[in-house]
Each structure stands twice: as structure tokens, then as C-alpha cells.
Amino acid sequence: MKGLPGKKWMLGGLSVVLVFAMGCAKKELVKSTGTGPGAAVSAETPTGKPGEIVTETLKPEAPAGPSDMAGKQMAMAGIAATQEKPSLFEDIHFDFDKSFIREDAKPVLQKVAEYLKKNPGASLLVEGHCDERGTAEYNIALGERRAASAKSYLVSLGVKGGALSTVSFGEEKPADPGHNEEAWARNRRAHIVLK
Amino acid sequence: MIRYAGALLLSLGILLLPSVSGAVLYIDINAPGGKRMPIALPDFVVTAGDASLGRDLPETIAGDLAMTSLFDVIARPAYLERIVPGHFGGKPLSFPDWKMIGAEAVVIGKVEVRGETMTAEMRLYDATLGNLMAGKKYTGSVRGYRKVAHKFANEVLFAFTGIRGIFDTEIAFSARPGTGRGKEIYLIGLDGRDLRPVTDNRSFNLFPRWSPDGERLAYTSYRTGVPQIYLRNLADGKDRIVAQHGNSKSPGSFSPSGDSLYVTLSVEGNSDIYRAMLNGPGLQMVVGGWGIEVSPSVSPDGKSVAFVSNRGGSPQIYVKDFGSSAERRISRAGGYSTSPSWSPAGDRIAFTSFSEGKYSIFTVRPDGSDQRLVLSGNGDCVDPSFSPDGRYLVYTFRKNGYSELKISSVDGRWQRGLFKGLSGAGSPSWSPRR
């Protein structure tokens, strides 16, 4: 506690100095200095001066989005997109973050190609899927790659490209709801259905 | 010593500037640590309307101010003076009663509800000087009643720091409503209240992204059976389709002027970044390549874009300055980095990275320097989105199928859960100021 009286005097002196230094001049509005993250963001504000009550009328609340189920048929298609379609074929699977066709996928794709040879008018949809890891937007792109990769392989087996369309569901439609390596391996897949 | 001098300066500032019309720097929002402003928020007077408004409104303001770590809300049981209608008609507050409990500022409010309309008058007093620092009288729909509290919290912050608040902004996100397997887009206030749906088509509705004026939301919907990008006008609820090209499509971010939308489109399995004009038919590739290019996030000056590419073998964050062909990698945290979000303040880019066995959120300067871990937990922290002032992040915390939205100050001083009422909550996007 020894230095305390000295400190008090110093602060007292400091305040006297400050009183004279600051005076009663109007101060500029102080915006954030360049050191903070908000620095670059300038802003207009409706605040009035101190001492005033400023009135403001708020915009009416936007209506909750109306039901956007435009037409029953389209609505069914949208709902159907969220449901797992049954398939005549097994799913083919992929390595993590990869889209190349594995050896274990080739026999399945061979069967798909044979089906199309026997049913030349058929149209197939190749869905690409991912496991839940990583982030959703990237997984849409990865699923797209997987679907395209399967399509490309089928074309190399002689299937006409026009018989195949692709769609990605990213991580949104897992085959297995589990959260382990086994579930993830099952979800990294292409699922092939009749259109 | 610095703390003490700061407090002294604070008190001197209050003493010396009784009624000048310029604002005073009471609190330097960028000074780390330091004294918090003790503020009292007594119940509002409700002259007509639901009595619960009297408690809900000041508590909403208190919750907003808590985000800043600059204020200390004095507990209600300590308050000595009761606020009455007369305090809004010339009767002064008994400032000694407030100073005695340690308050340096007091917010009082009066609410009147007539039918669907609510009028709320709120005042911020400097308890030491005994003067009115800010006063507002709002008229609006009673349905959106919490908005006036958020707006006045902005006024309180502005009065003390000169900084405009973001308390009336909102978060858009995607989540499973629980019926069926689809996901819808929702909006929610920063206080976790005012949850409301934007879509209702029971398909997959993903990746909501705000226009710079806050009036439109771009998002991907599978409601026709295949993914399309829609632009929703929030005022009238109408949708329009954008960028009909390729297979998978997702919106990234708008240009700062709002005249175009940067999107990811995939053609023949190859995802690239395009710029879609919104006032005409133009569509132009911006970042291409044989790899996966996805998730564009444009800088606030509109001159650069951050994006994800796996051209190096694994997904990483790159930045391209428009007008230059150079694209530089800026992520250095691990083997998988995605989901860039460029701060509206311009100085940092947040992203998700897989490092040490989990996904965490990092920020880095646009030149790739000064990479910092900012959000990490006992699970995965993914998909960050900056607040309009660049001081906060909203993100998804996920673990074993559980997911929750959280908000946090970028400096880590403050964080709070935002929403966990629906499963699969994710892809949060912070609205601009409106």
C-alpha cells in the first residue's frame, strides 16, 4: 500500500490536466479505429441527437412465404426427390472424397449396361451421394462427380449417353442413418434407378 | 494502470460533456478488456397490451447488449425506482436511486398496443449526468414486437461506441421440419426467437444466401425433382428461377451491388463457378477447371472471390482477384478446407477445415497470412457465416447426427447457442442490415 498516496495525487493531477485539455469543445463522432474488424464498415444511422425523441415507423412484417407447392404434380416430384427410390441394381460405392470407379463397382455397372442392351427404350437416372462428413455444398459437387463417373463408365461399356441422366443429392439422402465408418461407406454411393 | 485510467477517462468524459450535440466515445469497442458499462433495464410500462411485453422487451435488449461484452446489466431485484407513464411526460427519473445501485445508464420504455399496432417509446439516460442520450418512438405491427427492442439496442450501442449495431439482423438456415425427409429454409432472430419458414414444399431446400439489400434470398430447391436456384422476394413471397444451366446448382454470394449472383453450376459432372446476371440473361464462367470448383464468396468490394477447389488433390480455399488470372491458395490448416465466408468488413475470410480429427472454423487474411483457429469443440464446427459488421460468426455445430446453430464473437469473448429445435439444421447465412 506504500505507493498509494502518491498514485492518488498523480491521478488527481492527471484529472486536472485533462479537465483543461478537454474543455467543453464539441467532440467529433468517433467511429471505430482501423484496428478493429468493423473498421471498413461505415454506416448511416437514423439516431437523432441526444435530448430528442425520434419517431420511426417500422415497415410491416413480410408475410410468411406462401406455400410454394405450385401444382400437385410438381409437388409430388419434389417430395419424391426426398424419398429413396427402389432400384433393380445394387448401389456402387466410392472411396472417401473420391469419384473413381472401384473394381467392386464394375460388375454392377456391367449388369446395368446389359439391362439397357436388353431394354433399349429404358431411361436411367444415376444419383450421386456422399457420406455426412465434410460440408454440404462441397458434397453436392462430389455427388455430381460420382454420378458423372458412373455414367461415363457405362458409356464406355457401350451405353448411349442419352439413356442416362444424373443428379446429385450430396449428403442429404443417406442410405444408412448411422454415424460410423460402416454407415459412411454405404452412403458414398451411386444409386441407379429407372426414370 | 491502463484500466484505471480508462475508467477515470470514462467518468471524466461524462462529467465534461453535459449537453454537446456531438457524440462522445464512452466505450472504445476495439479496446480489449476494460470496464463494462453498468446499465439498468427496468420493466417497460405497458399502458395497453399484453403485460408480458413489459418484461420481454427490456430482456431482449439485455440479451442483445450481452453479445458485445461491453455492458453489465444490473439485476432487476436491485432496482429502487419503479417506472411509470409520467416518466415519459416530463417527470424526471430519480437518478440518485440508479446511481446508488451502480447504474451509469438506464433504459426505460413505454408500450401501447391498439389492435395490430404497437407504439413503443424507449429512452436511454446517462444516470451520472442525468440527461437523455437517445430516445426513439417506434410504431409498427405488434406481431414483430421484438424488432423494436433490437433496434433500440442498436441505438444504445451507437450512443456508447459510435458503432452501428446488428441486433435486428437475422439468420437464414436450412433444417428438417420433422415431417418427411425434406428440408425447408427458415429465418430466425439473433436471440433465437421469431422462427418462421420461408419455404413449404417438402422437398430439399438448401443453401439460403442473402441479397445485399436483405430483401431477397437465393437458395437451391429440389421441388421440381431436380435442383434449381430460386430467388425469393421476401416481401411478396414470390420466387424466380436463376441460372438454368447444368445439373447441380447452388448459390454462393451476391455481388455487392446486388446485380448478380455468383453460383456453382455443374456440367457433365464438373462443378465450376459462374456469375449470373439478375437483370438480364447473362451467365459467365468465373472460375473453371477440371477439378471441383465450388462455394464462391465475394469480397465486400466486389473485386475478389474466395472459393473451394480440389485441383491440388484435396479441397482447399483459393482467392481470385477479378481481372487477374492468378488464383492463390489461402488455406493451410489441414487436408480438407471448405465453406469460405468473406467478412463484410473485408479483412478476413472464415472457413471450415478438417484438422486433428475434426472439423473446426478458422479465419485467415485474404492474402493467406495470419491463419487462426477460432471455433473448435467436442464435435464438428462447420459452415461459418459472418455478421454484417464482421464481428460475429454463425455456424453449425454437429456431432453424430445432432446439429445446432451457434453464434460467437470472432475474438472468442462471447458465444451462445442460437437454435436446435429442428434436426439437420445447417447452412446458416447472416442477413445484412436492412
Image (cartoon, coloured by chain):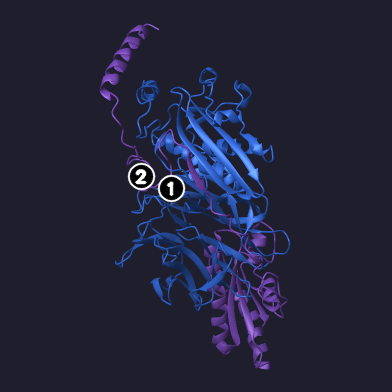
**B184 versus B240 height, above or below:** above
**A68 versus B32 height, above or below:** below
Marks 2/1: CA distance?
9 Å
Which of B223 and B237 lies nearest the eye of the viewer? B237
**Residue occupied by mark 2:** A39
State the image quarter where residue B306 is shown. Answer: bottom left
Chain ID of residue with mark 1: B
Q: Are marks 2 and 1 in contact (CB under 8 Å)?
A: no
Q: Colour of chain B?
A: blue
User: Which residue type does callout 1 highlight?
Assistant: Gly
Which of A39 and B291 lies nearest the eye of the viewer? A39
Across and down, in percent, residue A28 comes to: 31, 36
Q: Check the picture and name the quadrant holding the N terminus of chain B.
A: top left
Chain ID of residue with mark 2: A
Q: As drawn, is A182 to the left or to the right of B167?
A: right
Asked if residue B378 shows in the view, the reply is: no
Instruction: Give the residue displayed 54% in from the left and 69% down from the top.
Output: B230
Chain in purple colour: A
Across and down, in percent, residue B272 comes to: 44, 71
Residue occupying the far front of the picture: B89
Which of B162 and A87 lies nearest the eye of the viewer? B162
**Residue occupied by mark 1:** B390
Q: Residues within 10 Å of mark 1 (few under 14, many from 20)?
A: many
Across and down, in percent, residue A84 comes to: 70, 71
Q: As drawn, is A69 to the left or to the right of B394?
A: right
Q: Secondary structure at mark 2?
A: loop
Which of A79 and A177 lies nearest the eye of the viewer? A79
User: Which residue type does callout 2 highlight?
Assistant: Ala
State the image quarter where residue B283 is shown. Answer: bottom left
Circle number at residue B277? none
Across and down, in percent, residue A79 comes to: 69, 71
